[in-house]
Image (cartoon, helix red, strand yellow):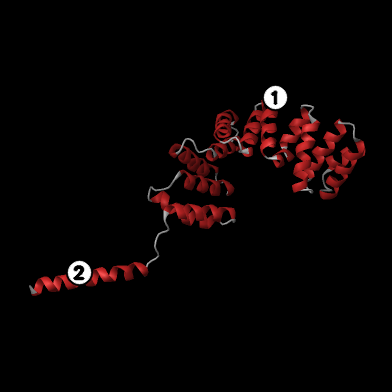
Amino acid sequence: MRIRTFLFAVLFTVLACIPLLAAGKPQPVPKRKAVKQAIKAYDAGKPKEVKALLEPMVKAGQASEIAYFYLGMVAYDKGNLATAEKYDRKAVSINPDYAAPYSDLAAILIQKGKYQEAIPLARKATELDPSNAEAFANLGMAQLSLKQDKAAYQSFLASARVDPNAIARSGAQMLIQYHDPKSALYYLNIALKVAPDDSLALLNAGQAYRMLHDQKSALDVLKRGYEVTPVKADVFGVITAV
């Protein structure tokens, strides 16, 4: 009887100490909470924090597709395309309906010069998420690289419809090339409200105005572009030609 009482006393003491022992050690962050924290850390430009939160999940075999995707973005931002591709492919293998990694895979393959492989991935991203302007832009870049100009034009236009700021880059040049300066100007003017000093957007706007024979507006935006980036000889050349 005394032995049994003694054992119960020891067991009670051990159980009572467990919370104290646990409190003395850093507890792992729950998986969902860690992913949310990692997303916030990425948006705040803290890649080390992202890795610290998500890499333990990978090692434990508990990482979700979102965790792999954000680790892939960290790798991509550092120029480590091989690691980024590995993480993105893992993300789509876990969840084939997750659009974001398809778009990033397309961007990686474009950088590697694998344009044909990039097209179905970018297209898959646009199908899964029609609001992904970057996916449409990646599709357009791959098509443009393969000289599929008409298809690229449609992809860049779709990108601009989703996010007008996207048109300030190569998309505007495609719209101008296909003699659609009105569409180019529509999106460029929206983009310039957000970033009025975007010299490339100003240059594209100047070219579009010239196609519409609005020389005064063309001169105005091209001068602004030259003031923003005076080292651009092509901008200056267009100004003097107006």
Which residue is at the front of the view, 198 or 163? 163
Q: The C terminus lies in which quarter of the figure?
A: top right
Compare residues 5 and 67 and report the one nearer the observer: 5
Marks 2 and 1 sit apart, C-alpha to C-alpha, by 77 Å
Q: Earlier in the sequence, mark 2 or mark 1?
A: 2
Q: Residues within 10 Å of mark 2 (few under 14, many from 20)?
A: few
Q: Along the horizontal axis of the image, is 137 left or right of 216?
A: left
Residue 117 falls in image quadrant: top right
Residue positioned 65% across, 35% down in the render = 137
Q: Where in the figure is residue 38, as x and y percent of width and height?
A: 51, 54
- The image position of residue 33, as x and y in percent, is 46, 55
What residue is at 60 percent from the left and 30 percent from the top?
A: 115
Count up the numbered dots: 2
Whether residue 23 is visible to the viewer of this picture, yes or no, is: yes
| Circle 2 SS class | helix
Q: Position of residue 58 (x, y in %)?
A: 42, 49
* Residue 48 against residue 25 in the figure, above or below: above
SS of the residue under disc 1: helix
Q: Is residue 242 visible?
A: no
Q: Amino acid at mark 1?
A: Lys
Return the residue at label 2: 11
83 is higher (above) or lower (below) than 148: below
Please state if 20 lies on the left or on the right of 14 as rendered. right
Which mark, residue 150?
1
x then y, percent, for residue 71? 50, 48
Residue positioned 21% across, 70% down in the render: 12
Mark 2 is on which residue type?
Leu
Mark 1, residues whose alpha carbon is within 10 Å: few (<14), some, or many (≥20)? few
Tag in front: 2 or 1 = 2
